């Protein structure tokens, strides 16, 4: 009897575990190096350098026959980086009116498009973005819902009408242009080292 109970319990536990794996929420992310994997940081050597990021969503299973529409926005510090262009992946051939778009005076970029069924599953490329580093410092790129102030708007929709917008884990990444040590600070530092060395010499 105990063996039978354990067998039933184990079967139910495994079924629940598999169900939770199958229904894991999709996530969006930035890929800076073209390997289709998520990147959360990037270092830029010089002001004026350009760089690119592919934007993906992963973890879309076929429970609802895949995605047939997508849309998101991301924010950035426009004093540090500017968007130069956004190219929607050709798989999304029904572009939403006015998208993609970006505003380098507000630090907001938006994209949205669709396709006809069948839907897309797995790891899906949404768009590619070209940036320029415009100043030294740090900018956080933060993804979020497209049109967050319009709660009735649905961006990520499956072929069966399932809306993913509230389920998605939206990605972030940091872009850093290393700030060099100012010349005055270098002089001060070398002077202090020199004084420390003289002090030790007189003590000896």
Image (spheres, helix red, strand yellow):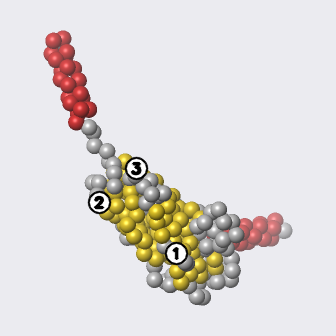
In x, y percent, where is residue 42?
Answer: 37, 57
Residue at 37% across, 66% down: 84
Quarter location, residue 78: bottom left
Q: CA distance from mark 2 to mark 3?
A: 14 Å
Is label 1 in contact with label 3 (beta carbons under 8 Å)? Answer: no
The answer to whether residue 156 is left or right of residue 37 is right
In x, y percent, where is residue 62?
Answer: 62, 80
Residue at 66% across, 71% down: 153
Quarter location, residue 188: top left
Where 194 sits versus 137, above or below? above
Q: CA distance from mark 2 to mark 1?
A: 28 Å
Where 87 sits versus 40, above or below? below
Residue at 44% across, 53% down: 77
Name the one closer to the observer, 140 or 8. Answer: 140
Q: Looking at the rendering, in which quadrant would you find the N terminus?
A: bottom right
Q: Looking at the rendering, in which quadrant would you find the C terminus?
A: top left
Q: Residue tagged by mark 2?
A: 49
Residue 36, can we see it?
Answer: no
Residue 79, can we see it?
Answer: yes
Q: Say which mark, if any, is on residue 137.
A: none
Q: Say which mark, if any, is on residue 138.
A: 3
Mark 3 residue element: strand
């Amino acid at each position: 009897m105990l063996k039978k109970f354990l067998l039933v319990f184990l079967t139910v536990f495994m079924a629940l575990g598999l169900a939770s794996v199958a229904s894991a929420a999709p996530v969006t992310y930035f890929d800076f190096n073209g390997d289709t994997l998520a990147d959360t940081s990037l270092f830029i050597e010089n002001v004026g350098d350009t760089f690119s990021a592919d934007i993906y969503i992963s973890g879309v299973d076929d429970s609802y026959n895949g995605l047939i529409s997508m849309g998101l926005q991301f924010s950035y510090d426009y004093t540090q980086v500017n968007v130069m262009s956004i190219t929607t992946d050709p798989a999304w051939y029904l572009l939403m009116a006015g998208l993609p778009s970006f505003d380098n005076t507000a630090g907001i970029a938006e994209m949205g498009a669709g396709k006809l069924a069948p839907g897309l599953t797995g790891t899906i490329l949404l768009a590619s973005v070209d940036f320029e580093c415009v100043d030294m410092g740090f900018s956080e790129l933060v993804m979020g819902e497209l049109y967050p102030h319009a709660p009735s708007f649905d961006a990520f929709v499956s072929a069966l009408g399932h809306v993913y917008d509230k389920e998605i884990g939206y990605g972030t990444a940091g872009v850093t242009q290393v700030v060099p040590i100012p010349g005055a600070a270098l002089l001060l530092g070398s002077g202090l080292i020199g004084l420390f060395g003289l002090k030790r010499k007189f003590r000896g």
